[in-house]
Amino acid sequence: MAYFLGVDTGGTYTDAVIVDEAATRVIGSAKSLTTRGDLALGVGRAVDAALAQAGVSPSQVSLVSLSTTLATNALVEGQGGRVALVFIGFSDADLDRGGLVEALKGDPVIRLAGGHTHAGTEAAPLDLAALEAQVAGLADQVMGFAVAASFATRNPAHEVAVRDVIRRVTGRPVTCSHELSANLNGPKRALTAVLNARLIGMIDRLVAACERHLAAVGIDAPLMVVRGDGALISAAMVRERPIETILSGPAASIVGARWLTGEKDALVSDIGGTTTDVALLRDGLPEIDPQGARVGGFRTMVEAVAMRTTGLGGDSEAHLVTEGLDGGLRLGPRRLVPVSLLAVEHGAMVHAALDRWLSSEAVGEFDGRFAIPMGGNAGGLGPRDMAVLGRLAQPMPVQQVLTSRLEVAALERLVARGLVMVSGVTPSDASHVLGRLAAWDGAAAEKAVRLLARRRNGRGERFAPDAPTLAQAIVDQLTRQTVDCLLEAAFAEERAFEGESPEALARHPLMAAGLSQHRGIVEVSARLGVPVIGLGASAPSYYGAVGERLGCRMVLPDHAGVANAIGAVVGQVSQRVSGLVTSPAEGRFVAHLADGLQAFADRDAALAALEAALVAEATVRAQQAGAEEVQVRVTRDLREAEVEGRAMFIEATVTATASGRPRVAHS
């Protein structure tokens, strides 16, 4: 019998699952810490453990599928290689639109005359000789190129010509904007192309790491990757279009939730180490964000699931709020390394520091905090930042890293660059104290939480009398913030409240009173009207209380902790292409085809020609993406205006969507 292998590489864990070929049940699953230095190590440990638990030999695996949050994390953290943008037929003002300058971060821009008009005719000739001289000088300075031309979605000829020159002269990867989106808005397409080019190296390393381990253990099967809309794409194709993997992990979790539960209408809430991702399942399918995926502050043109992401997870920083007399708690949005996890590999150092801090009644500003070097490119750092980084040869207490107050800001800059991580108390530590988790060093967690409880509020009193009391308060705060997150997502999808702020509605006193079933002169009742599917390894620990507060059915399926990996392997391959028919003059209809414009005297003939071309292209793309038994669905969006009682054709958009199950190595 053959089996499918699903892998999900997240910021904290890499998960692997084995599913039977009929995709009806999970045979085995495993988790391993993600190894950022060498991704193949974390992938390999998870895969090997899942195979062993399932009792499946590598030769029996017929399909491998991968989902990841690494692309999303890289854009959020401002990471990625240096690229050059070839900007054709645009003005200087266009560079300032849509966050393009911010996304470029000083990377080179080559401005060229050229591009096309909205009708697809050439606006100005393209100077390929000038281009060749400029890209030759950049070949050794960048890892790839992004190409965007004016109205390239109406006629991509100039982008294609530039791409061919760059590949011939430099051999570097080239991303053309028209390949990523069929929509107008050139600067936004250029932004998407720049981000795609920046991610190529990183996603290539992940795919290569996965392929290396599969080959080493003897798995000979196609490798697929999950896109941000939940569909699958071949590893070869994703190497050229890595931008499509943003929100890949959350999209896979939604597919996994549907498969695990059979629920058709529900909120899916996936709690990880860093974030909580919430999306709506409606009639068994997730909603697609019509404006394109937003990530790292940038609005791209990548189709992805409509997802609300909050910086709240099991590894969120636990802040003690000291304003006011009583103070309070707040979690996130920054991710810390839990003290209990740091102690697994550095137990002697962690326990020695915690014991030393606990021996004093006074609590220092940085007590309970550790700094961890992460490696990476340290270019562009100032002398003070370099001095702090130079002391961090290995994890150590924060107070040993700093020699003055001036270096606190330097440490924060290193954290922002991803060169250093901070370890401190998180909900994961609180769960160890309460006995809900036992995966890491529970004794270190108890000491760290007890130390945090000794801090003083505005009244001069300790925040909590002991570690269990503060640990419960941290878990209760996670419940409150999760409830707010789910209500925000619900109100955002509730058409009756369109135009209102979901954040304000979720936190309104009447909403809080309704959830508490307030009974007085005014009686108020409220509850969530759809079930919540809780995903993530820590969901069973936290989400029971969330369901009680929201008055809804909480679905906590088996294998909820590896739902992303399940979703990675049970999805469909899908490719969508669109094209236009315009009417520049009465009785003249122009089909905008990939190989140029074609004019017709009849509207239906133009539509038929375009439809045939799109069906053929979508089918080929789906097959290249790894699909077999491809089925194609075609939709037409006709725009007409009534003039003197007669319908006048303006333009039409035709879309062909080709779908199919991925090919497998053997059956």
Image (spheres, grey):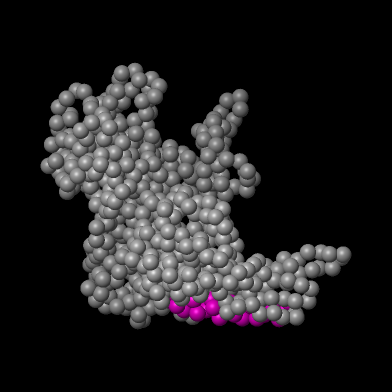
The image position of residue 663, as x and y in percent, is: 41, 78
In the rendered image, the quadrant that contains the C terminus is bottom left
In the rendered image, the quadrant that contains the N terminus is bottom left
**Residue 14 found in image quarter:** bottom left
Above or below, comparing residue 220 to residue 12 in the picture: below
Q: Is residue 576 magenta?
A: no
Residue at image point 34% right, 34% down: 319
Q: Is residue 159 visible?
A: yes
Residue in front for this viewpoint, 475 or 81: 81
**Identity of the residue furthest to the top in this view:** 459
Residue in front for this viewpoint, 646 or 90: 90
Query: Chief secondary structure of the magenta span?
Result: helix
Q: Is residue 624 magenta?
A: yes
The image position of residue 350, as x and y in percent, is: 17, 40
How many badges with numbers are in the image?
A: 0
Residue in front for this viewpoint, 290 or 641: 641
Q: In the visual, does 489 lie left or right of 274?
A: right
Q: What stretch is highlighted in magenta?
A: 603-626
Q: In the visual, does 494 lie left or right of 214?
A: right
Residue at image point 38% right, 65% down: 138
**Residue 456 found in image quarter:** top left
Q: In the visual, does 389 lie left or right of 537?
A: left
The image position of residue 483, as x and y in percent, is: 46, 41
Above or below, comparing residue 456 to residue 96 in the picture: above
Q: In the visual, does 138 lie left or right of 592?
A: left
Q: Is residue 25 visible?
A: no
Residue at image point 22% right, 73% down: 216
**Residue 19 found in image quarter:** bottom left
Residue at image point 54% right, 31% down: 509
The image position of residue 579, as x and y in percent, is: 61, 72
